[in-house]
Amino acid sequence: MVLGLLFALHGASSLFGIFGGARGTGQAVEIGAWPSWWAALIQFVGGLLVLIGLGTRVAAVICSGSMAYAYFVVHQPAALLPLNNGGELAALFCWSFLLIAALGAGAWSLDGLLTRRHGRATRPEPAPETARV
């Protein structure tokens, strides 16, 4: 939940120019600008989906992929290691979302709630015992 919230806030800052704006400029990124606006949209929507636990695995894979793209396109050309190229946050988000994608949603997620409801609704009632003579 915390990872989703942090990712959504990161996207919101770039989309809406809040919390310091895109890269601390106080401004929002231009609508439709490639790849900044699209990355911010993935961060905001994907972060919210992971936060509430809806479509968690798919959202987490997309979020992980966007951070892998950010790392290799934006950070890695400057230096190989994240500590040297400023890509620690991108690497942490990437691997954390990949872990969430592998493990799935938790017990407090909407995915979990829907699964429990669906599981109860489709579970067949046990057959009554018949008396044997």
Image (cartoon, rainbow, N blue to C red):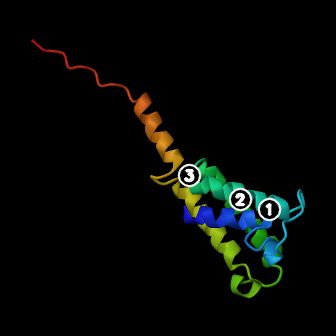
> What kind of element bears circle 2?
helix
- Asked whether the beta carbons under mark 2 and mark 1 sit within 8 Å of each other, the answer is yes
Residue type at mark 3 is Gly
C-alpha distance separating marks 2 and 1: 8 Å
Of the numbered discs 1 and 3, the one sitting upstream in the chain is 1
> What kind of element bears circle 1?
helix
Residue type at mark 1 is Leu
Q: Name the residue under label 1.
A: 15
Q: Mark 2 points at which residue?
A: 44
Q: Give the answer, above or below, for where 85 lies relative to 60.
A: below
C-alpha distance separating marks 1 and 3: 22 Å
Of the numbered discs 3 and 2, the one sitting upstream in the chain is 2
Front residue of 16 and 67? 16
Q: Name the residue under label 3.
A: 53
Residue 43 in percent (x, y) is at 72, 61
Residue 131 in percent (x, y) is at 14, 15
Q: Give the answer, above or below, for where 60 lies relative to 112.
A: below
- Asked whether the beta carbons under mark 3 and mark 2 sit within 8 Å of each other, the answer is no
> Where is residue 122, by image quadrant?
top left
- The residue lying at 43 percent from left, 29 percent from top is 121
